[in-house]
Amino acid sequence: MLSISTIQRVAIKISVISSVFLLAACASTVSSTEAGGVFDPFEKQNRKIHAFNRGLDKALVRPAARGYSALLPDPIEDSIGNFAENLGQPSVIVNSLLQGNFKGAGLSTTRFLTNTVLGFAGFVDAAAEFKVPEHSTDFGETLYTWGAGEGAYVELPALGPSTVRNTTGKVVDLFTNPLSYAVNSPDKYYGTAASVASRLSDRGRYRDTIDSILYESADSYAQARLIYLQNRRFGLGDKTANDSTDPYSDPYEDPYAQ
């Protein structure tokens, strides 16, 4: 049972969520992004952050990802990725409910319970054996569903391409996973560690594509920005499309780890 102090903390975080939502809602006045354009008023600062991110990737992330992939067999990498994804499912459930997507909430609940009980806490994707479809969403998509505009394009240190709306979503998603309130330290940080490991696995697995964007493009900033915006917009619009194929398909939506 939740204690009074826990309820108070949740109430405070809900207030924070409300505040950042209002901030994101202000972005709805921007029409150029809704028409498929690029709204990048912070390009000068974004390019500086992009240069920092490239340097960080070259010096640390890329070598670490190569070492990680070389050290662990693919099945173990996949198991860690499954574990991280499973721990994130409660947040997906919450966001699905906030979007009024009860089918998605049901799918995520089924996957979470199946993989937790039958998949050894999620290390095995047991739900796939029962042909339960994958479902993923975040608070950035919740804001989109609520009518918040995309806002300006921004590049975040270490996290890479984003928008005002999605950055707001990233902040709020720090609070939307019920497991963060139910699990005590240090167990609550296992998911964070698994998520970081999963991102390293993705960086190693898709290194050729990511390297071509970051180090072989004539303008890696513009290329990364274009790929991110196209993929994110398609992903949001694809929720109402039937049998669509992503024309901008890329195995790694964010050229960096999101």
Image (spheres, helix red, strand yellow):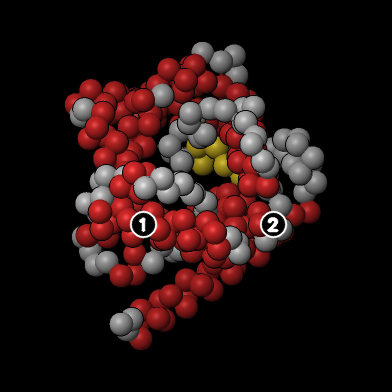
- What residue is disc 2 on? 148
106 left or right of 28 in image: left
| Residue 237, placed above or below residue 44 | below
Left or right, 109 with respect to 35, comes to left
Indicate the position of residue 99 as horizontal and vertical percent values. 60, 61
- Residue found at x 46% / y 23%: 210
**For mark 2, does the 10 Å Cα neighbourhood hold few (<14), some (14 to 19), or many (20 or more) residues?**
many
Residue 15 lies, in percent from the top left, at 54, 73
In this rendering, the answer to whether 194 lies above or below 51 is: below
Q: Amino acid at mark 2?
A: Ala
Residue 75 locus on image (x, y percent): 24, 32
Where residue 200 appears, as percent x and y from the top left, is: 33, 33
Vertical side of 189 occupied by 10: above or below: below
Numbered badge on residue 244: none
In the image, which is nearer the foreground, mark 2 or mark 1? Answer: 1
Query: In the rendered view, does 101 fall on the left or right side of 92?
Result: right
Could you tell me if residue 225 is visible in this image? no
As helix, strand or loop, the secondary structure at mark 2 comes to loop
Which residue is disc 1 drawn over? 112
Residue for point 39% across, 67% down: 178
Are discs 2 and 1 less than 8 Å apart at CB?
A: no
Identity, as a three-letter code, of the amino acid under mark 1: Phe
Q: Looking at the image, which is closer to me, 177 or 167?
A: 177
